[in-house]
Amino acid sequence: TTDETLQLVSLPSALIAETASYLKAAEYITFSECCRKLYVSCHVPCRIVHIPTCLLKRYPEHLSMAKFIHLKQLGLNVRHFITKVSPVNQSTWNNVALHTLQLSNRGGNECDVDIFLQRRLITHTENLKLHKFGKDDTHPYDAASFARLLCTFPMIEHLLLWDVFLSDDEIYNCASVRDWLPCL
């Protein structure tokens, strides 16, 4: 209501921005559009900390992503990222330290992931979530390519895999995996 909005508007902008940063991305955007004070508090600078894959896919290509300096969690579809996100916006993520990176390979293949890895844009994250690598047991993802992906993130502390189907043409021992991921 108007009374509640007025009370919220009376808070300092920094407190509004910090509070809003705990919202999910869609809620953050809706919250910021309630009134001018909330919009300015939330977007100067932008304090959003989590962008899920679905929101990144809808982000307008012509807008800069440089405003997301406070981002802690990023979800991205590898194929969409390398083909639809501009090189300038891709470079936004160069040397960014994320708390959580979620990579989805839905609709992609080993070549897409190899291109993503060659660009070495995002390599610092504590948590790595990998989704949709391989379609099923009859259409697995190349295990050697998957190992190269894991080696790119040696500092991860937590690893979550779902819908990951790997080829069985590679054999890895536990010591090798510990060498790739010493903090896991």
Image (spheres, rainbow, N blue to C red):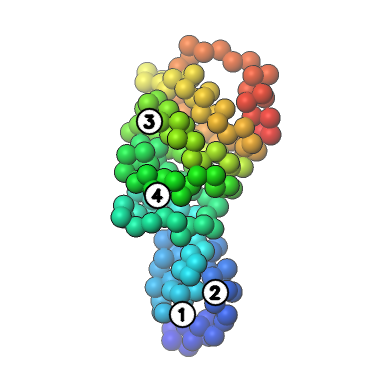
Nearest to N terminus: mark 4 or mark 1: 1
Mark 3 sits on what residue? 112
Q: Nearer the viewer, mark 2 or mark 4?
A: 4
Mark 2 / mark 4, whichever is N-terminal: 2
Dot placed on the residue nearer the N-terminal end, 3 or 2 = 2
Mark sitting earlier along the chain (2/1): 2
Alpha carbon distance from label 4 to label 1 = 28 Å
Q: Residues within 10 Å of mark 1 (few under 14, many from 20)?
A: some
User: Where does label 4 land, which residue?
Assistant: 89
The three-letter amino acid code for the residue at tag 2 is: Ile
* SS for dot 1: helix
Residue at the spot of label 1: 37
* Label 3, label 1: how far apart the Cα atoms are: 42 Å
Residue 132 in view (yes/no): no
Residue at 37% x, 44% y is: 87
Query: Nearer the viewer's eye, disc 4 or disc 3?
Result: 4
Q: Residue at x 58, y 34 (%)?
A: 153
Tell me the distance, in whole angstroms, between the alpha carbons under discs 2 and 4. 27 Å
Type of residue at label 3?
A: Asp
Which quarter of the image is occupied by the N terminus? bottom left
Residue 155 image offset from top left, x and y in percent: 64, 36
Residue 134 % position (x, y): 40, 26
Q: Real-space Cα distance between discs 2 and 1?
A: 9 Å
Q: Nearer the viewer, mark 3 or mark 2?
A: 3
The residue where tag 2 is placed is 16
Say whether disc 3 or disc 1 marks the residue closer to the N-terminus: 1
Q: CA distance from mark 3 to mark 2?
A: 39 Å
Tell me if mark 4 has few (under 14), some (14-19) or many (20+) residues whose alpha carbon lies within 10 angstroms of its own.
some
